[in-house]
Amino acid sequence: MNCRDIDGMLVERPPASPFSAEVEDHVRGCMRCRALVSALGTFAPGDLPSPATLRQIESGIIASWYQNCGDENATELFPFHWDVVGQSPVKVVMGKGSGIDSVKNGLKNLGVQFTEEEAMRVVAAVKDFSLKHKRLLTDAEFRSIVTTTIPSSVAGSTKGVKTAV
């Protein structure tokens, strides 16, 4: 499969027909063909990860492992430390794959104290938001969800609420 084959296939095939696995492999690896397929508004195989998102952790269990290992033991999870290749540090992000440990860490980073039940409500709200908008949450959106979901605790306020362990 080469670029000329892709050109011919795009001219001859019906617009809604799916790509074969061979075509998808070529388009994934060829910037020219990926740009062409994208410009034509035709389905393009999954985009390659960008350097900006490569070190984002959404998965709950991986986020928990990272929190347990910390930056000093990050090579327990990654083949090499991000400093070695000039990349930005790892960041735990909130989205549909986030779990209770990610949310608890996010709440602690905001300085919010919470109960286990409140943390679970925030997890559900994070997942709902992410599924509805089909993307990760920004830090501001996470703060807004926390403020809405735990009304007794405005982000930054720790008055009268116990932290779950």
Image (cartoon, helix red, strand yellow):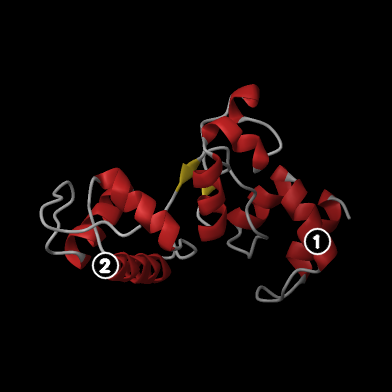
Q: Nearer the viewer, mark 1 or mark 2?
A: 2
As drawn, is 157 to the left or to the right of 116?
left
Q: Quadrant of the C terminus?
A: bottom left
Q: Amino acid at mark 1?
A: Val
As drawn, is 28 to the left or to the right of 108?
right
Residue 153: give its label.
none
* Rendered position, 48 above or below 151: above
As drawn, is 150 to the left or to the right of 79?
left
Q: Amino acid at mark 2?
A: Glu
Residue 23: give its label.
1
Could one spot residue 76 in this view of the protein?
yes
As drawn, is 127 to the left or to the right of 20?
left
Crowding near the residue tagged with mark 1, few <14, some 14–19, many ≥20 C-alpha atoms within 10 Å: some
Residue 84: horizontal and vertical position, in percent?
Answer: 65, 23
Looking at marks 1 and 2 on the same chain, the residue that comes earlier in the sequence is marked by 1
Which residue lies at the image location 51% right of the left edge and 53% below the top edge? 64
The front one of 51 and 108 is: 108
Residue 18: horizontal and vertical position, in percent?
Answer: 72, 73
Q: Quadrant of the N terminus?
A: bottom right
The front one of 44 and 53 is: 53
Could one spot residue 137 in this view of the protein?
no
Which residue lies at the image location 49% right of the left edge and 45% below the top edge? 67
Q: CA distance from mark 1 to mark 2?
A: 48 Å
Which residue lies at the image location 81% right of the left edge and 69% below the top edge? 20
Which residue is under mark 2? 118
Label 1 sits on a secondary structure element that is: helix
Label 2 sits on a secondary structure element that is: helix
Crowding near the residue tagged with mark 2, few <14, some 14–19, many ≥20 C-alpha atoms within 10 Å: some
Residue 107: horizontal and vertical position, in percent?
Answer: 30, 52
* Rendered position, 79 above or below 110: above
Residue 141: horizontal and vertical position, in percent?
Answer: 28, 55
